[in-house]
Image (tube, helix red, strand yellow):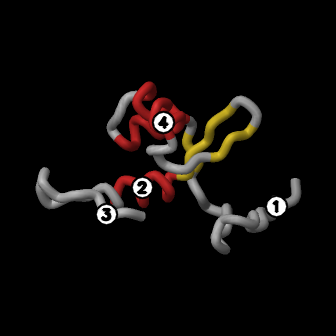
């Protein structure tokens, strides 16, 4: 079997998909430490991490999840989220 070559997809800011870890919604929820239903609601409202929709499947990139989570780091409960 020949090696598969994965080419970058336009719209991903020049990032290659090669070596990226893909997670389904239950795995992504576990990665983030939240419930699946919470993650699903965030996807519905647009408040959650970005994802790929392939047919009926929702697929998250582990790097995107880590970045999304890091953007929510706070030093105190009174710290306001900065506008993106």
- Classify mark 4: helix, strand or loop: helix
Give the distance between the C-alpha atoms of the residues marked 1 and 2, in whole angstroms: 32 Å
Q: Are marks 1 and 2 in contact (CB under 8 Å)?
A: no
- Comparing marks 4 and 3, which lies closer to the viewer? 3
Residue position for label 3: 82
- Comparing marks 4 and 1, which lies closer to the viewer? 4
| Mark toward the start of the polypeptide (4 vs 3) | 4
- Comparing marks 2 and 3, which lies closer to the viewer? 3
- Classify mark 1: helix, strand or loop: loop
Q: Is residue 29 left or right of residue 57?
A: left
Residue 3: mark in rendering = 1
Give the distance between the C-alpha atoms of the residues marked 2 and 3, in whole angstroms: 13 Å
Residue position for label 4: 27
Residue lying at 65% horizontally and 46% vertically, measured from the top left: 52
Q: Are marks 4 and 1 in contact (CB under 8 Å)?
A: no
Q: Is residue 55 above or below residue 80?
A: above
Q: Are marks 2 and 3 in contact (CB under 8 Å)?
A: no
Q: Are marks 4 and 3 in contact (CB under 8 Å)?
A: no
Q: Position of residue 73 (x, y in %)?
A: 26, 58
In-front residue for pair 35/7: 35
| Mark toward the start of the polypeptide (2 vs 3) | 2
- Classify mark 3: helix, strand or loop: loop
| Mark toward the start of the polypeptide (1 vs 2) | 1
Residue 68: mark in rendering = 2
In-front residue for pair 1/31: 31
Residue lying at 87% horizontally and 59% vertically, measured from the top left: 2
| Mark toward the start of the polypeptide (3 vs 1) | 1
Q: Position of residue 58 (x, y in %)?
A: 62, 37
Q: Position of residue 4 (x, y in %)?
A: 81, 59
Give the distance between the C-alpha atoms of the residues marked 4 and 1, in whole angstroms: 27 Å
């Amino acid at each position: 079997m020949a090696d598969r070559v994965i080419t970058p997809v336009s719209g991903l800011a020049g990032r290659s998909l090669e070596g990226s870890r893909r997670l389904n919604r239950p795995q992504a929820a576990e990665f983030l430490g939240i419930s699946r239903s919470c993650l699903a609601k965030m996807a519905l409202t647009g408040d959650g991490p970005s994802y790929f929709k392939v047919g009926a499947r929702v697929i998250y990139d582990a790097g995107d999840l880590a970045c999304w989570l890091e953007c929510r780091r706070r030093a105190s409960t009174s710290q306001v989220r900065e506008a993106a």
